[in-house]
Image: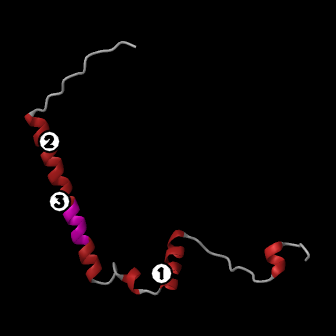
Amino acid sequence: MLRRKPTRLELKLDDIEEFESIRKDLETRKKQKEDVEVVGGSDGEGAIGLSIDPKNREQMINDRIGYKPQPKPNNRSSQFGSFEF
């Protein structure tokens, strides 16, 4: 493999201006997102997951992701199959 000297990169005024504009755009998007979350939290929609007891919260999450847990049987034959003691 041939070794070459490092390439010199120069920072231009256009690059700085582009960076600043992108940064400002990202900051405005972030502020808008925070404002939407604050407004959503004040009307009760955002805080609904915090005020519900853990069982209902778990059920709500399971419904949202499509998980339907099966009840666990409590007898020994279902736990260990057909083994005899």
As drawn, 52 above or below 28: below
- The answer to whether marks 3 and 2 mark residues whose Cβ atoms lie closer than 8 Å is no
Pointer 2 residue: 18
The residue type indicated by label 1 comes to Arg
Most distant residue in the right direction: 84
Earlier in the chain: of badge 3 and badge 2, it is 2
Name the quarter where the C terminus is drawn.
bottom right
Give the percent coordinates (x, y) of residue 12.
Answer: 10, 32
- The answer to whether marks 1 and 2 mark residues whose Cβ atoms lie closer than 8 Å is no
Depth check: 32 or 52 in front?
52
Earlier in the chain: of badge 1 and badge 2, it is 2
Give the percent coordinates (x, y) of residue 29.
Answer: 21, 59
Query: Real-space Cα distance between discs 1 and 3?
Result: 33 Å
- With 67 as the anchor, is 74 left or right in this view? right
Q: Examine the residues drawn in magenta and state their main secondary structure.
A: helix
- With 79 as the anchor, is 4 left or right in this view? left
What segment is highlighted magenta in the picture? 30-36
Q: Is mark 1 on a helix, strand or loop?
A: helix
Give the percent coordinates (x, y) of residue 75.
Answer: 80, 83
- Asked if the stretch drawn in magenta spans residue 34, the answer is yes
Disc 3 crowd rating (10 Å Cα; few below 14, some 14-19, many 20+) is few
Pointer 1 residue: 57
Pointer 3 residue: 28
Most distant residue in the top direction: 2
| Residue at image coords 33%, 14% | 3
Res 30 → quadrant? bottom left
Disc 1 crowd rating (10 Å Cα; few below 14, some 14-19, many 20+) is some
Name the quarter where the N terminus is drawn.
top left
| Residue at image coords 25%, 71% | 36
